């Protein structure tokens, strides 16, 4: 491997993965329904990805996701929360925790990223105990399948996209750049992947429930790949108007994209499918070259 980070024996971000997190996908796996034709069309988009993840063998996954009032409630609403614990239990979202492995953290790298990013003026909340919900476990299941243990430690990074005010796309993109700098200054030669999750278009409530906007979603994917700074300038209200109230989850993808090297990434995989439950499923793998 080459590159300035490796030359100094520091950690580096090798790739970013982006995926929706629809809870019914987790239920389809957990309840043995993944071979049904409806779900096959979704899982087909991840066959390549599962092999790719095994081959790319990350040492740590920095997983950007949103909690859905499971770890956090209206009692306390951190905008950005970094999980610094040694392990994270699977949340009970009302019908028992998903039967998936617990999440092993990476306290040392998480603490280093917190130190660096906070000194770069992003006010993270440090979370030493946190259960992780479908926002984190469904992306892991999609990328790993049904496994006895997740392939590597995972640093959960929760973003508030549930209770307004939510962070802007620009803030998320800039935070991604600060996370890149933090990882590149960690004094261990770790291969780190950053995952951006949630979205794409969906609205779960109100008169527009069921809204999906494939045109907006695909333009988002195009611009996320080719011109992320322009996508970062899109105000949050545009996501809500065009992609539905829960479409705002898409801003989290900009954190992962901001953590990638400047310059065009390699697009290793792109998948789009509608619908899964109420949601448009989007999925990308971008690699630093
Ligand atoms: C659905 C999608 C979500 O992002 C979520 O958090 C809950 C439900 C859905 O499509 O059903
Ligand atoms: Fe969600």
Image (tube, helix red, strand yellow):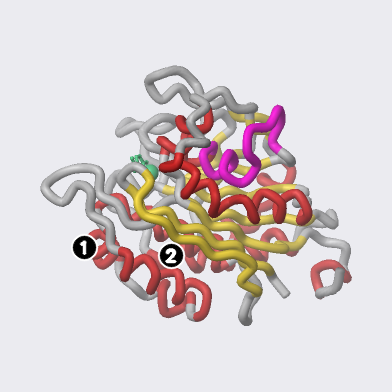
In-front residue for pair 191/139: 139
Does 142 sit left or right of 279 as displayed?
Answer: right
User: Which quadrant: the N terminus?
Assistant: bottom right
* Residue 249, x across and y down, in percent: 38, 53
Residue bearing mark 1: 241
In-front residue for pair 142/72: 142
The quarter of the rendering in which ligand 1 is drawn is top left
Secondary element at image label 2? helix
Q: Is residue 211 visible?
A: yes
User: Which quadrant: the C terminus?
Assistant: bottom right
Question: How many numbered circles are shown?
Answer: 2
* Residue 247, x across and y down, in percent: 32, 55
Does 24 sit left or right of 237 as displayed?
Answer: right
Asked which quadrant contains residue 76, the reply is top left
Q: Residue at 84% x, 57% y: name it.
A: 189
Within 10 angstroms of label 1, few (less than 14), some, or many (20 or more) residues? Answer: few
- Above or below residue 31? Residue 238 is below
Disc on the earlier residue, 1 or 2: 2
* Magenta part of the chain: 137-150
Residue bearing mark 2: 171
> Does any atom of ligand 2 lie closer than 8 Å to the CB of label 2?
no
Asked which quadrant contains residue 177, the reply is bottom right
- Above or below residue 178? Residue 210 is above
Within 10 angstroms of label 2, few (less than 14), some, or many (20 or more) residues? Answer: some
């Amino acid at each position: 491997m080459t590159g300035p980070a490796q030359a100094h024996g520091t950690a580096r971000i090798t790739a970013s993965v982006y995926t929706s997190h629809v809870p019914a996908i987790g239920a389809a796996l957990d309840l043995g329904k993944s071979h049904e034709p409806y779900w096959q069309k979704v899982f087909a988009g991840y066959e390549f990805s599962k092999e790719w993840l095994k081959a790319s063998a990350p040492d740590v996954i920095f997983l950007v996701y949103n909690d859905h009032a499971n770890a956090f409630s209206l009692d306390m609403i951190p905008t950005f929360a970094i999980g610094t614990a040694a392990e994270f239990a699977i949340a009970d979202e009302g019908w028992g925790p998903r039967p998936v492995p617990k999440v092993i953290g990476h306290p040392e790298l998480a603490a280093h990223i917190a130190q660096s990013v906070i000194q770069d003026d992003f006010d993270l909340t440090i979370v030493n105990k946190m259960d992780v919900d479908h926002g984190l476990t469904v992306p892991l299941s999609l990328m790993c399948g049904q496994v006895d243990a997740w392939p590597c430690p995972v640093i959960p990074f929760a973003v508030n996209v549930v209770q307004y005010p939510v962070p802007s796309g620009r803030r998320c993109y800039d935070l991604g750049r600060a996370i890149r700098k933090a990882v590149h200054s960690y004094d261990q030669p770790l291969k780190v992947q950053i995952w951006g999750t949630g979205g794409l278009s969906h609205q779960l409530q109100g008169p527009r429930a069921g809204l999906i906007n494939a045109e907006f979603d695909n333009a988002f994917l195009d611009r996320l790949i080719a011109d992320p700074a322009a996508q970062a300038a899109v105000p949050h209200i545009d996501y809500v108007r065009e992609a539905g109230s829960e479409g705002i989850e898409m801003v989290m993808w900009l954190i992962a994209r901001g953590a990638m090297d400047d310059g065009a990434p390699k697009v290793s995989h792109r998948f789009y499918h509608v619908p899964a439950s109420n949601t448009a499923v989007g999925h990308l793998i971008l690699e630093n070259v």
